[in-house]
Amino acid sequence: MNKDIYNSYSDNMPHNDAEAVWGSCVEIIKDNVNWRTFQTWFEPIKAVSLQSNILTLQVPSQFFYEWLEEHYVELLGKTIKRILGKEGRLEYRIVMDGGGTQRNQASVNMPGGIRNNTPRDSNYVDMPLKWDDPTNIKTPYAIPGLKRMQVDPQLNSNYVFDNYVEGDCNRVARSAGMHVAQKPGATSFNPLVIFGGVGWGKTHLVQAIGNEVRRLHPNKTVLYVSAEKFINQFIDHSKNNEINDFINFYQLIDVLILDDIHLFVPAIKTQDVFFAIFNHLHQSGKQIVLTSDTPPKDLEGMQERLLSRFRWGLNADIQPPDFETRQAILEMKMRHEGLVMPEEVVKYVAYNVQSNVRELEGAMIALFAQATLNKKEIDIELAKRVMKNFVKTSARELTIENIQKMVCDYFSLPYDKLLVKTRKREVVQARQITMYLAKKFTKSSLKNIGEHFGGFDHTTVIHSCQTVENLMDTDAEYKESVLELQQKVQLASI
């Protein structure tokens, strides 16, 4: 402790204003800790009130309070004694989840470095900070054999933007990821939170960001880590009395990619530590990339202060891949693996495996394995047998309702609009094409088809089918749309 600094302060410091008193304390503390420690553990503190030489401070959490008491009680005690005199004391107000506060009933008598008797977790013990020599920090991902600290980024080199297929389902997230990779920490997309269902491509995308950062900015330290691994590391470091090393290590990262943050919900102490790490990285202009299986606003149990920070940047969703994207993924995968498969089989697989990308790729691999082991050609019949292991199949007859829904999805038209008698061009066109496809692919009579559209007679159905055929002969774009829809119906009928 620097005694000269204490002696430089006057005994006439203001005692009637909590913020002024804490401001004076802060000036002393700044001279006695390194700036990273100050940012993490003292900058978030707010002065609440000052009554009878008792300064009440507001801290973000119980964990934060315990950390201050374990590691900086002597510094705080001597500082408050210097500013408020021998009778100076501290109380803490802890911010609770939901924005409320709870007063800690035990006053903390700080003079002389005496700790209060509040029980604490024995995992949290005093440890020296090692920022002056980063090589002394025990890093979870250090590369063995190197004298200076160098972090293994934990990235899969196969996950790059070149093989991440773009579609309507992921276009915004992919574009944002490219932007972040080009200027990590220097865009408004910080943090970048990508959310979506299992197997929809979140992990591939965020690792592609990490690999692109390493390619464009080789001097930046990049780290990908799953939330589960982060939690386990925190527990291990707590047991080994190495929490300072844990926090300090993560604060050294230039681009931190944390996967599956929804796993933080039940881990309250991990949330507290991540809050400190997040604050430091963000304030230092470092990039943070997160993924979740739900939108941040739906993460019930996550601290509001963390949720508010997740909203600072961009929240981009990834939707399940549509048919065209699934087909493109299969074609890209085949090119990469040097495989060949008939186009009709590719489309059949893409149409039937709709859940996620992992199952899509698994179906393709299984199909090639069956063909190789059984020495058979890949065709629709083989695909049908293999698909039984990936999708629930049942004998089903293609109905007029099925076709109506396909056409409505294709033209982004509400289903009920198709059944309304109107002269609007987009509705009439969709209805005519649906009638044409229903006649072509179902066994329904013309009268029955007409009744499915709100009571049209069979002559209207005949006229609609003739109109579609005429337009296909004269309008190439129209023909392409009809053929594409026809192909979808065919796949559904297989």
Image: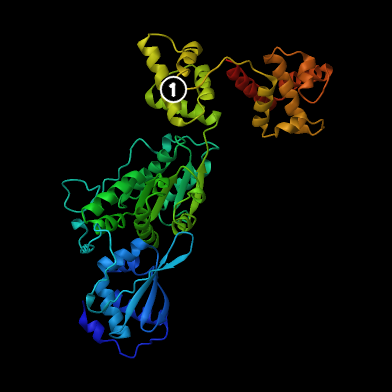
Image position of 51 with respect to 157: above or below: below
Query: Can the viewer see residue 388 in this picture?
Result: yes
Q: In the picture, residue 8 is in which quadrant?
A: bottom left
Left or right of 57 in this view: 441 = right
Name the quarter where the C terminus is drawn. top right
Dot 1 surroundings within 10 Å: few (below 14), some, or many (20 or more)? many
The colouring scheme, among rainbow, by chain, secondary structure or one colour, is rainbow
Q: Residue at x 55, y 29 (%)?
A: 324
List the residue tagged with mark 1.
363
Where residue 71 appears, as percent x and y from the top left, is 25, 67
Left or right of 402 in this view: 72 = left
Residue type at mark 1: give it.
Ala
Q: Residue at x 47, y 13 (%)?
A: 385
Where residue 346 appears, as percent x and y from the top left, is 50, 21
Image position of 185 with respect to 345: above or below: below
Where residue 315 appears, as percent x and y from the top left, is 50, 49
Task: Check disc 1 and report its element: helix, strand or loop.
Answer: helix
Q: Given the current orientation, which residue lies at the most extreme top position?
A: 375
Name the residue nearer the viewer: 129 or 407.
129
Q: In the picture, residue 448 is in which quadrant?
A: top right
Name the residue nearer the viewer: 209 or 27.
27
Q: Given the current orientation, which residue lies at the most extreme bottom position?
A: 12
